[in-house]
Amino acid sequence: MKKGLALTGILCWLSLALAVSADTIQKLGDGSDGSRAVPVHLLGLYDESGASIAANDDRAQPFSMRQTCRLCHTYESIGRGRHFNYTDPNVACGRTGQPWILVDAATRTQIPVSYRSWPGTYRPEQLGVSPFKFVELFGRHLPGGGAGELDSNIPEEGIRQLISGKLEINCLACHNANPGQDQAEYAGQVTRENFRWAITASCGFASVSGSAAAQPDTYDPLMSDAIKVAYRRNAFDFRNRVLFNIVRKAPAERCYFCHSNLNLDGNDSERWTQDEDVHLSAGLTCVDCHRNGLEHNIVRGYEGEDRVSKNPLASTSTCEGCHLGTGSSAAPAEGRLGAPRPKHPGIPPIHFDKLTCTACHSGLWPGEQACRTKTSRAHGLGTYNVNKSADALPHVLTPVFARGADGKITPHKLFWPAFWGVVKDANVGPVGLEAARRAVGQALGEERAPRSGDWLPLTREQIGKVLSAMATEESVEGKPVYICGGKLYRLDGAGNVLENEHGAAKPCLWPIAHEVRPASQSLGVRNCQDCHATDAPFFFGKVAVDCPVGRQAQSVKTMVDFEQLKPFYVKAFAMSFVFRPWLKLVILGSCAGLAGVLVLYALRALASVVKVLSEENSRGKTKE
């Protein structure tokens, strides 16, 4: 008996050791042999169970990236990359980035959501959003992995996950150069809960029909053809291998699906009317700057990233790192990738202590008022049946010049959170989305959201009704409140609606770096008044307060509020530039006057010297 237990223990230890060593052994594609040529990816396809897929299979299964790619690549190492590790609490968050924005028109909600601990964001579970639901909501613009591969701890969702499968890392989303790679189809499959089928449907040589969301809990993908996969037969060679057009440098078009912006500047909202980033126009691609190795620890390119990132290019891939060579590299880094060295003639050095490079060179040229913008991740750009209205929620504004965590002013995108919440232990947090829907439905009844996707109007009286309904919800623990437009709304003891400013109602901001404008279009290129005029948008531009409550929606903030500067000081300093040309004339006139006086006195002194010398000369001749 003891021998049997000992043998079992040894076998378990050996199997564990072999599993660990298998993950640590470098595979064929984990490292480069030095060749710049891209290996031909003529691969056999494997489903999630590891079974081989053939062109003539009767009931074809979707192929698995994990099983197909792991023959040459360590899948687990890739999964620790920046695009996939967002659910890991042990990963450094780095500089604040764009959060996911959960929008629900019926409850007048737009709230920043993130698994990363960024200021002003809320974790999905605080809103009752499980990883499975998170993928349903945002998987359209996720490259797989992360929440897509987490097991649900909710029994009902666990059953659905057996049907939908998991959303594996989609290597093709970035590295497939085949023009048939269809990320819109990928997004459509995710919305139908076809997680295990999404990659296959988007690859260009297969099609998928059916919806996992429409199947009963008893559905078995191996026993039913309600969800069908059809592979293009001529995509397979005689050994049942498929040629993938894999490239190391992901084309910019692949990045655009998740990282596009559409600025709604007046009537000029067409993509073709807006200039491309100057780096892309010069021939660079996204991955020339945002590089990574197998571990996919991609460079983000912000100043100070090298303090939290292990990527060796983090210090040399910033604006200064490329253009000035100020990174930590031992070799000269100035002019990296052909970057010109800026001279900045006449600009006082204090500007480089107070401003980031992007403050002058990135984003839209500031106007009298920050304009609305759409982003792929916030508005589902590039997906089927996307709402193209300029009023579609969430309402994101740009450029907003605000002081960043490093103390420097930098351009940001901004939106004003709106959500139903509770105050508990002096902290404000959101209530679950389902609880908010019940309370709003009970208080306000069924309402139809406008086709534009804009706010449903909300009055103070309606807020009071919803807060009263929320107080009866068993799942709501704490004092109900509504956050909107920088204000917190609550009920007093008499049932009256009170409002006041609150830290939880502050706008959510994240810094931007693109689109980069050329030096000839940077702030200050004309004169100091680009920023220091008495009405310059850099300091005095207006930022609308976005809110469904009509009275609040009419208010605005100015840039100095976000730059944490005193308006009087900025105004007074700007006034000095009004009189600066006169001051220059006065200084020049004064200098000319002083020069004239000095010349006059110099001539008089010279005359005195000449007179003295002539008198001495005359006395000398008289003695002789």
Image (cartoon, helix red, strand yellow):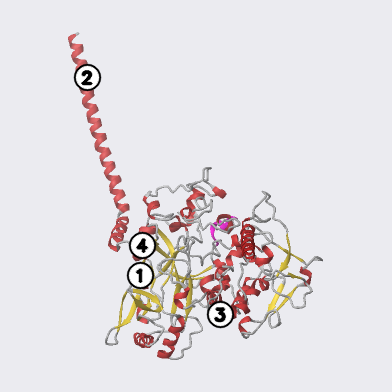
Label number found at residue 557:
1
Q: Where residue 272 appears, x then y in whole percent?
A: 57, 67
Q: Is residue 303 visible?
A: no
Q: Are marks 3 and 1 in contact (CB under 8 Å)?
A: no
Q: Quadrant location of the N terminus?
A: bottom right
Measure how far apart labels 3 and 1 are at the Cα level. Answer: 44 Å
Q: Where residue 146 appears, x then y in whole percent?
A: 55, 68
What residue is drawn where x is 39% and y is 75%?
A: 429
Q: Earlier in the sequence, mark 4 or mark 1?
A: 1
Name the residue beneath numbered marker 2: 614
In the foreground, 158 or 443: 158
Q: Read off the magenta span.
A: 276-283
Give the amino acid at mark 1: Lys
Give the amino acid at mark 2: Ser
Q: Where residue 585 appears, x then y in whole percent?
A: 30, 49
Q: Residue furthest top?
A: 624
Choose mark 3 or mark 4, whichever is in front.
Answer: 3
Q: Earlier in the sequence, mark 3 or mark 4?
A: 3
Q: Provide the secondary structure element on which disc 4 rests.
A: helix
Measure how far apart labels 3 and 4 are at the Cα level. Answer: 45 Å
Q: Earlier in the sequence, mark 4 or mark 2?
A: 4
* Rendering quarter of residue 420: bottom left
What residue is drawn where x is 53% and y is 64%?
A: 85
What residue is drawn where x is 30% and y is 52%?
A: 582
Q: Residues within 10 Å of mark 1 (few under 14, many from 20)?
A: some
Q: Residues within 10 Å of mark 3 (few under 14, many from 20)?
A: some
Name the residue beneath numbered marker 3: 157
Q: Is residue 351 above or below residue 383?
A: above
Measure how far apart labels 2 and 3 are at the Cα level. Answer: 113 Å
Name the residue beneath numbered marker 4: 563
Give the amino acid at mark 3: Glu
* Rendering quarter of residue 406: bottom left
